[in-house]
Amino acid sequence: MNLKTYGMAMFNKVFIESNYLEHPRVFRILEKIKYQDKIPINDIGDVWGRVKKPYLQKRTNLNLFIGAKKGQLVKEAPPAYGAGTQKHFYFIHAYNCIYECEYCYLQGHFNTPDLVFFVNHHEIIEEMKEVALNNPGCWFHAGEFSDSLALSHITGELPEYFDFFKNNPDEKLEIRTKSVNIKELLKLKPLPNIFVSFSLSSEYSAKKFDLKTPPTKHRINAIEKLVQAGYRIGIHFDPIIYVNNFEKDYEDIITNLSQVLPDSSLAYISIGVVRFTGDVYHQTIRNYPDSEISHTLFSKSEDGKVRYNRPMRKWILNKIREKLLPYYQNDKIYECMED
């Protein structure tokens, strides 16, 4: 099986909830992918993840599920999740990711790497309206359980969310991504309350740990195009993984970034070190026993996460902040998941 990110995506099987077999959005998705079998089902939850499927099977055997997101559609984010003092929420438009980052928490979060596309975006937006009514000026985030842009040319939901934020200028949207698939964004008019945020690693770390993702230099090229189009940009130097020469590696990437992203177009930068829950850490060791991550000395921190000890974390984060300050305002830089 070959999964092509920006052409025709190919799946082994596509499972579709029967209530959505005739839905226009489903027709659009099916037109843009290749698949071997199409199977109607009553409910995604009846099939997806019911039998544990090894995470690394995504390399050779990937299925797609299409249907409605049920239950709570918008959830409050954990503390220190985003910039500012307003409340932060994330909405769930998909499950799982085509990329294969060695540290990804999804490998220990679900029982399967199979993708899910939710198509009831109008219901998600209705719930967002309720959240915004009760939390004026809040943030919404896309990309918690799946990359927000990597398959956006297939799923096609971005215009609906842009309409919502155009009509709700006090609320803010963050679109989180490691993708360079920005063509759907370039079709839309940028809004002052929509921010496209890129997770960046040093060139070395991206090559070693961000498997199947676009190289960092390509992400910077995408940032440049969005800046030229008028978008405001967020940056996530997260997770930072300590390796030999990490200071020089990040100095290089920050210098390159500063040449295409002026401070006036930057909304915020988050910095954070690699971290795991216990389950995800053990899954990472199992999936990538030869990775540098697997041979790193971590400890269980005060919040139960597996990561570097506090003095080392602070040292790493301070080094990155020092390298950012010649180019970007200090009050735009915040530490992610550290408070």
Image (cartoon, rainbow, N blue to C red):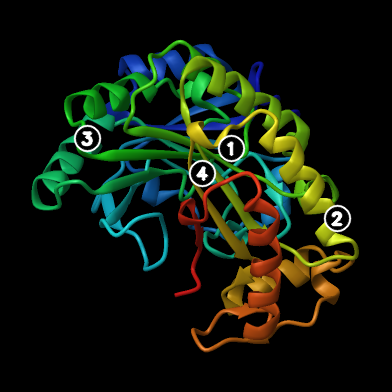
Q: Earlier in the sequence, mark 4 or mark 2?
A: 4
Q: Between 161 and 256, which is closer to the camera in this rendering? A: 256
Residue 164: where, in percent of width, then height?
22, 27
Q: Please name the amino acid that badge 3 sits on.
A: Ile
Q: Nearer the viewer, mark 3 or mark 1?
A: 3
User: Is the Cβ of the residue at disc 4 closer than 8 Å to that at disc 2?
Assistant: no
Residue 256: where, in percent of width, then height?
75, 36
Q: Earlier in the sequence, mark 4 or mark 1?
A: 1
Q: Nearer the viewer, mark 4 or mark 1?
A: 4
Q: Residue furthest front?
A: 326
Q: Nearer the viewer, mark 3 or mark 2?
A: 2
Q: Quick check: 265 above or below 327?
A: above
- Relative to 188, is 223 on the left or the right? right
The quadrant in which residue 242 appears is bottom right
Residue identified by numbered label 2: 248
Q: Which residue does the image show at 49% across and 33% down from the upper left? A: 264
Structural distance between the alpha carbons of marks 4 and 1: 15 Å
Residue identified by numbered label 4: 146
Crowd class of label 3 (few under 14; some 14 to 19; many from 20; radius 10 Å): some
Residue identified by numbered label 3: 125
Q: Earlier in the sequence, mark 2 or mark 1?
A: 1
Residue identified by numbered label 1: 63
